[in-house]
């Protein structure tokens, strides 16, 4: 702490009025001023603003002569840590120098192992039955879209190279029941939205969430009886939901419910109705995570009681994800998803190593909101940290990334000429 008496929030006169003994005042002053550097003040911008442009002598001879103390010379002695080359310059005898592959932007681009493109993204969109948009307070920058805004957002994202969209509905409370029958209403919000998207943007790939929680008056992903989520009854309802979405024009259905056996049942239901080309993106390793709060705010779908730990995976378990992945692949899943994303990069890698199916990562609402909060505080550069985060998913093994940053990230990628 570097202060002087002049920095204190009271005057010398007020100190005198406080009747502090002179010896104490002098001691405080001497101690505080003793920490103040006598060196001239140099601004940070002066030191680091443009980097040092002065030439550096590669021999490093004589650079420590005027220090006033003896400095260690790494080139001296019988076993020098640093040698000298034929020109007398200091030389670390290292043949393999990984920095050579990082020496310029061009070289870095040439050897880059993982590249994120807008085509890797699935863009989640929140929708509701209103004629206006509503901000989602816990997810800055995200909204519940009205139909017109949804179409506009999709059109802009398509222009930037984002091709796939997943819809999440905010359903009116009066339509919610324990059996969640609204989930397969052909005139429901999701079904109407699918038809609208396909009519205006036939090239768009529409993915749908297959789960009952947005439609449940219990706030759970399944049908509830005496506080228990009924697995097989729920799967029965999910099959109806998936087939109805396929009839509306969905290209991909994504069961996020984590009920046992639902992938096989949904695959059989789709195939029996002639929808053999509709893909299944299974939420294979969906964890009972604390990162979902803002998403549940967006859909008003917080659990009405308890939690979801009896069907979603325990965050402490890794091997269990391999069991789920093997079952989903055997049952007919086309793609496997890990949710959440960043805290579960190890699970993404495990699934990538264990399966030949494409792997998806969900950059969930809590992760998104954490970044937004840090950006708003000025602690992080939003563009840099988002693109790094998305690249980390790719490096860990994700082929597909669900992210609320899809449109913005695609814009940044375009601006930077990365794709």
Image: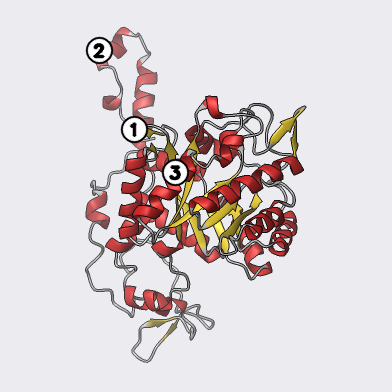
How far apart are labels 2 and 1 at the CA level? 67 Å
Relative image position of residue 117 (x, y in whole percent):
40, 65
Q: Sequence order check: which comes first, mark 2 or mark 3?
A: 2
Q: Where the C terminus falls, by quadrant?
A: bottom left
What residue is shown at x 34% (from left), y 27% (from top)?
A: 29
Residue 237 in view (yes/no): yes
How far apart are labels 2 and 3 at the CA level? 77 Å
Above or below 90: residue 348:
above
Locate residue 228 relative to residue 270 in the image: left or right. Answer: right
What residue is shown at x 60% (from left), y 61% (from top)?
A: 274
Question: Mark on residue 192?
Answer: 3
Q: Sequence order check: which comes first, mark 2 or mark 1?
A: 2
Local SS, label 1? loop
How far apart are labels 3 and 1 at the CA level? 15 Å
- State yes or no: discs 2 and 3 in contact (Cβ < 8 Å): no
View extreme (front): residue = 273
Local SS, label 2? helix
Above or below 270: residue 151:
above
Mark 2 vs mark 3: give the one in front.
3
Q: Quadrant of residue 66?
A: bottom left
Reading the image, the residue beneath label 2 is 13
Q: Quadrant of residue 135?
A: top left
Q: Where the N terminus falls, by quadrant?
A: top left
Residue 370 in view (yes/no): no
Q: Sequence order check: which comes first, mark 3 or mark 1?
A: 1
Local SS, label 3? helix
Reading the image, the residue beneath label 1 is 131
Q: What crowding class fits label 3: few (fewer than 14 Cα within 10 Å), some (14-19), or many (20 or more)?
A: some
Above or below 116: residue 75:
below
């Amino acid at each position: 702490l570097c202060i002087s008496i002049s920095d204190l929030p009271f005057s010398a006169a007020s100190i005198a009025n406080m009747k502090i003994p002179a010896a104490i005042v002098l001691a405080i002053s001497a101690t505080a001023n003793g920490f103040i550097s006598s060196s001239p003040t140099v601004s940070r911008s002066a030191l680091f603003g443009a980097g040092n442009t002065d030439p550096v002598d590669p021999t490093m001879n004589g650079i420590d002569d005027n220090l006033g103390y003896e400095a260690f010379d790494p080139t001296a002695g019988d076993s020098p840590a640093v040698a000298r080359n034929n020109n007398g310059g200091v030389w670390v005898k290292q043949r393999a120098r990984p920095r050579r592959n990082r020496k310029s932007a061009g070289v870095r681009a040439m050897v880059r192992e993982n590249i994120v493109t807008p085509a890797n993204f699935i863009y989640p969109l929140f929708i509701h039955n209103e004629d206006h948009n509503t901000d989602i307070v816990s997810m800055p920058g995200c909204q519940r879209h009205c139909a017109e805004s949804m179409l506009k957002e999709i059109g802009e994202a398509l222009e930037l190279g984002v091709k796939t969209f997943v819809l999440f509905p905010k359903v009116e409370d009066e339509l919610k029941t324990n059996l969640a029958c609204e989930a397969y209403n052909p005139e429901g919000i999701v079904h109407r939205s699918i038809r609208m998207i396909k009519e205006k943007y036939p090239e768009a790939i529409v993915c749908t969430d297959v789960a009952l929680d947005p439609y449940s008056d219990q706030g759970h992903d399944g049908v509830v009886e005496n506080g228990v989520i009924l697995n097989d009854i729920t799967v029965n309802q999910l099959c109806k939901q998936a087939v109805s979405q396929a009839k509306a024009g969905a290209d991909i259905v994504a069961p996020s419910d984590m009920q046992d056996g639902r992938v096989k049942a949904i695959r059989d239901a789709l195939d029996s109705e002639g929808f053999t080309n509709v893909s299944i993106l299974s939420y294979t390793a969906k964890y009972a995570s604390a990162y979902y709060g803002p998403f549940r705010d967006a859909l008003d779908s917080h659990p009405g009681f308890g939690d979801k730990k009896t069907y979603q995976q325990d965050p402490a378990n890794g091997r269990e994800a391999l069991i789920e992945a093997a079952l989903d692949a055997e049952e007919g899943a086309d793609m496997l998803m890990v949710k959440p994303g960043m805290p579960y990069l190890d699970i993404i890698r495990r699934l990538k190593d264990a399966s030949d199916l494409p792997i998806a990562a969900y950059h969930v609402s809590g992760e998104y909101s954490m970044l937004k909060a840090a950006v708003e505080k000025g602690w992080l550069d939003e563009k840099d940290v988002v693109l790094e985060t998305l690249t980390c998913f790719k490096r860990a093994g994700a082929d597909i990334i669900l992210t609320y940053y899809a449109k913005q990230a695609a814009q940044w990628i375009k601006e930077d000429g990365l794709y």
